[in-house]
Image: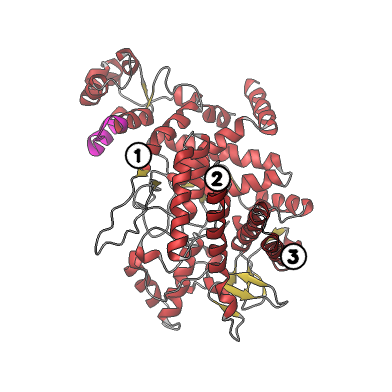
Amino acid sequence: MQIWRSILGAALVLVTLSAGPLNAQEAPATIYGELLQQVQTGRIFPDSKTFADAVPQREPSAIMADYRRTAPANRAALEVFVLANFVVPGVNDRGTDILRRHIRNLWPMLVREPDVPTTGGSLLPMTERYVVPGGRFREMYYWDSYFTMLGLAVDGQQQLIESLLDNFTFTIERFGHIPNGMRTYYLGRSQPPFFALMLDLSDNDDRALAARRLAALRKEHAYWMAGATCLDATGACARVVRMPGGALLNRYWDDHPLPRDESYLEDLTTARQDPSRSATVIYRHLRAGAESGWDYSSRWLADPRRLSSIRTTDIVPVDLNSLMLIMEEEIAERCAAQDDQACAAAYTDMAGERREALQHYFWMAEEDRFADWDRVSRAPTPRVSAAMLFPLFAGAATKDQAAAVAQTVTRSLLAPGGLRTTPLHTGEQWDAPNGWAPLQWIAIAGLERSGQEELACEISRRWLETVSRAFTETGKMLEKYNVEERTPGGGGEYPTQDGFGWTNGVTSALLERYAGNPVCEMQRQAISLQDAR
């Protein structure tokens, strides 16, 4: 099938352009003019013949229009531009090397140096170098950074990983948690807690540093569990919910029931659309939805077609509680390594209780899936979503459950270009037809961990094909993709962004993981045989 060959890059090399007959007869210097001059005089490639022999990946006129509009500011930016738009002999003409090299060249474009505090500005200064997602996201973000770090790990950027960990540790020490992003207006909320998993990407074995990071991780856990001390008659406070059987689980929240600074008009507009509800209640639900990272999705909506029906804080999310399980198990393991057996025992007990609660409240045997739990109706929600894969990722699902979830995913979420976020088309960006890099990774890693390697490989193959195709057509790595049409994604409060940190990270990590997986390799060989026939 053509899909696999596209992933390996053959389609990039053999791409057919619709240039007219005149362009077909013109020399590169005529077609590319100033671009060629800059590449050749800047010695982007040691041999001048290299660029002269390069093959454009899309219409030359479109490439030149982008070149004139973006005007690469330095040699590194110019190289990134060239490799994104041309198949260059001996450089990026070897299959997946096209994407890998492009991403490796993108990392410096997304790196920022330590910040200088500015009076009256909203940026929370970082003390070490960090990576931004790209586009309108010009500061460091929480859960984005974990998926970015996956790519940094396989692309030889270990020092940058340690810098990011230092920044996150410092941030917890200063604020008590990791905010949504490094802006003052994000301090009222966090994001899906991936700090525990970030720590596993470190190769620093300094015992004192490990103790400092463990203290920060425990402090983050305390932030998420702080509501346990103020539970009211409703059984909830801040980010903590007491379940009917007494277990303490977590929900998304925000400390400020106000319009978001960064989406002020949008929140005012949404609140006005439902005069039957208090505006402050709607603002809280909107902000909690932003803490979830899924801003926004039918997961949080009473009416999938109306954002104003949002009710995030009424829902106990399966993904958040799976991540909290990972955090508690990680703390227990790190406490044991520090010879703090009392700590290890306490967090082991917490993890055990949460593991039991995940099975009791979130597993829907009759529907073969894990679900969010509605604390108002006191039952699982009807919304099918990719969040069902988080218990697999956390190792909290049985083999039978994983097999059942795999069938549900194949039936409801698997699209031609990867994993849908939900099956519903609502216009919200965390619904169909969009697919997102972090959810592809969670699904692939979770399915593989649970013995469902064939589906893991299939999602990986389809997703890489989507990223490869969009890169071929646009020269960009994008924030999200339409996995039904294998095109750039859409919907939500802002245009699709390019850059893009977590897509770069997951793509590099999957290309590394995919190539060495024997099940995926068998699948690739089977596809190649079908193509040959």
Residue 379 point in image, percent of width and height: 68, 73
Q: Residues within 10 Å of mark 1 (few under 14, many from 20)?
A: some
- Front residue of 473 and 393: 393
Instruction: Please state which amino acid type lies under the numbered disc 1.
Output: Met
Give the mark count: 3
For the record, the magenta segment spans 61-76
Instruction: Please state which amino acid type lies under the numbered disc 3.
Output: Glu
Q: Earlier in the sequence, mark 2 or mark 3?
A: 2
Which residue corresponds to the image point at 67% horizontal and 59% vertical from the top-left? 340
Q: Residues within 10 Å of mark 3 (few under 14, many from 20)?
A: few
Residue 472 appearing in the image:
no
Name the image quarter holding residue 532.
top right
Label 1, on which residue?
109
Q: Which mark is residue 403?
A: none
Residue 486 point in image, percent of width and height: 49, 42
With 340 as the anchor, is 507 left or right in this view? Answer: left
- Front residue of 4 and 239: 239
Of tags 2 and 3, which is closer to the observer?
2
Residue 108 point in image, percent of width and height: 37, 37
With 61 as the anchor, is 428 left or right in this view? Answer: right
The stretch drawn in magenta includes residue 64: yes
- Front residue of 519 and 523: 519
